[in-house]
Structures are given as C-alpha cells and as structure tokens.
Image (cartoon, helix red, strand yellow):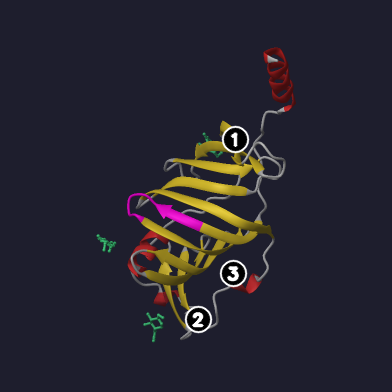
Amino acid sequence: MKLLVALACMFVSCLAKEPSPCKGPPLLTGKLYIQSHNDHITASGGYVYDAIGERVRLTEVVILDNQTHKADVLMDYKKQVLYDIHVQNKTCKKFPLKSEFIPLNVPGNATFMSQFILGDASYPGDGLLVNTWTGDLPKKEGKFYITVTDSRCAPVSLTYPDQQFGWLQISYLDNVVGITDPSLLIPPSFCPEDDSSLKGEPMGLIKFLKQRK
Ligand SMILES: *[C@@H]1O[C@H](CO)[C@@H](O)[C@H](O)[C@H]1NC(C)=O
Ligand SMILES: *[C@@H]1O[C@H](CO)[C@@H](O)[C@H](O)[C@H]1NC(C)=O
Ligand SMILES: *[C@@H]1O[C@H](CO)[C@@H](O)[C@H](O)[C@H]1NC(C)=O
C-alpha cells in the first residue's frame, strides 16, 4: 500500500510541469479586495484594468471601517493623474498621481516561489492550481509578489510595498477577460480637463482612501 502511494505521488510529480513566466490578460474587469497592513485600511470594490493604456478604475469602493465610506476613482498612470469622481452630484477632482503602474504579469526574469491549490485539492473542480512569483517593481522600489492561475495567468493576488504606505495586498476576484464598459476608463465630462486644476499633494491609492476615511 505504501509503495502504491509512493508510486502514485511520483506519477503526479512527473506530470506536474515547471511553471513558466506568463502574461496575464491585458484587459480585465472584476472585483478586488485591498488591504494596507501599515494603515489598517481594508477596502473592496469593482475594478477595470487596462494594461495597454495603463489606466485603472475602481468603482463602488467601500472602505471597511467602523463606518463605511464609498469612493470612485480613476487612475491614469501614463498621465500620472488621479480623478476623484462623485457621480451623484456630478463633481470631480483631479490630483497628481504618485504611483507606478504594476502590470499583472509574471516578467521573464521573475523568480518562481511556490505552487499550491486554493480551495480543496481532494475533489476535481473544487481546487484552483496557482503559482506565486516574485520580482523587482518596475522602478526597483522593492519587490512584488504575484499569484496567478497556472492555466491562464489570471491574477489571484498582488502584494507590494507602496512607495508611501508600506505593504499592500490586492486580491482579484470574479475576474472576466475584457472591459465590459470602456467609458469607465475615460474621465467623465464633468471632470476638469485643464491641468491648472491639478492641485494638491500627489497621492497614490492608499493616501486617497485614507483621506476618504
Ligand atoms: C472602531 O470601534 C472600536 C470599538 O468601538 C474602537 O475601539 C476603534 O478605535 C474604532 N476604530 C476606528 C478606526 O475608529
Ligand atoms: C458631492 O458629493 C460628495 C460626496 O457625496 C461631497 O463630498 C461633495 O462635497 C459634493 N460636492 C458638492 C459640490 O456638492
Ligand atoms: C528584471 O528585469 C527588469 C526590467 O528589465 C529589471 O528592472 C529588474 O531589476 C530585473 N530583475 C528582477 C529580479 O525582476
């Protein structure tokens, strides 16, 4: 019996192939869950991710605190602009963005860390095979850790040190390839266009969420 188990394990490990670096889908829509460890900020909401235009929209963000606060934000990483959007009263503020775009990919020179199954490994269809990798952030301001699905490189979670606010962990849920509503990546018409309105201290997502708390 022991021999049989040992043989079965060998057979399984023979089948398991070494994961390779991979590119995730460039356009994604879904939900996310953000945790900032240093600031004890926890938030969840919808997201739209565009790796080509380097834009991310977070909708119906709920900051989970003793009270909950809502937010809607569009980040344009190429222009380094953050829009604080209030759809109900059609107001919008524009801030300088201080944050780098982190593509949801496993770059070719990333280091493989581990492979594991999320959920239950004992029943087919109840477990998800994922791989965790680490690499340097684009501006080398620390290391990122990314977990992606083994089959299609869809993001599961991303952990990285935010330039201003320490470790940030983002979990990606209900991901769907593509962008269901492209207008979400364009600043609404009631947002200021001119850069003279770009006032205030540059901020990243966590600072934005902190101010909203
Ligand atoms: C939340 O409420 C608890 C208990 O009422 C309190 O101890 C804590 O300081 C509150 N946290 C914040 C961030 O206000
Ligand atoms: C619009 O609504 C937001 C929150 O709902 C509020 O903070 C802001 O002051 C409002 N702006 C104006 C001009 O009423
Ligand atoms: C991988 O390549 C990128 C860009 O070419 C570089 O910035 C980074 O330092 C390299 N090393 C790691 C471990 O990511």
Q: On the picture, is 76 further left or further right than 15? A: left
State the residue position of label 3. 185
Residue drawn at (73%, 16%), measured in percent from left and top?
A: 4
Q: Report how far apart the C-alphas of labels 1 and 3 lie in the structure.
A: 34 Å
Circle 1 — which element?
Answer: strand
Specify the segment rendered in magenta.
33-40
Percent coordinates x, y for residue 179 in the rendering: 67, 65
Which comes sooner in the sequence, label 1 or label 3?
A: 1
Element marked by disc 3: helix
119 and 176: which is toward the camera:
119
Image coordinates of residue 7 in percent, x first then y, are 72, 16
For residue 116, the mark is 1
> In the rendered image, which residue does mark 2 sit on?
87
Of badges 1 and 3, nearer the viewer stands: 1
Q: Could you tell me how far apart the alpha carbons at marks 1 and 2 are, in whole angstroms?
A: 41 Å
Q: Is residue 37 magenta?
A: yes
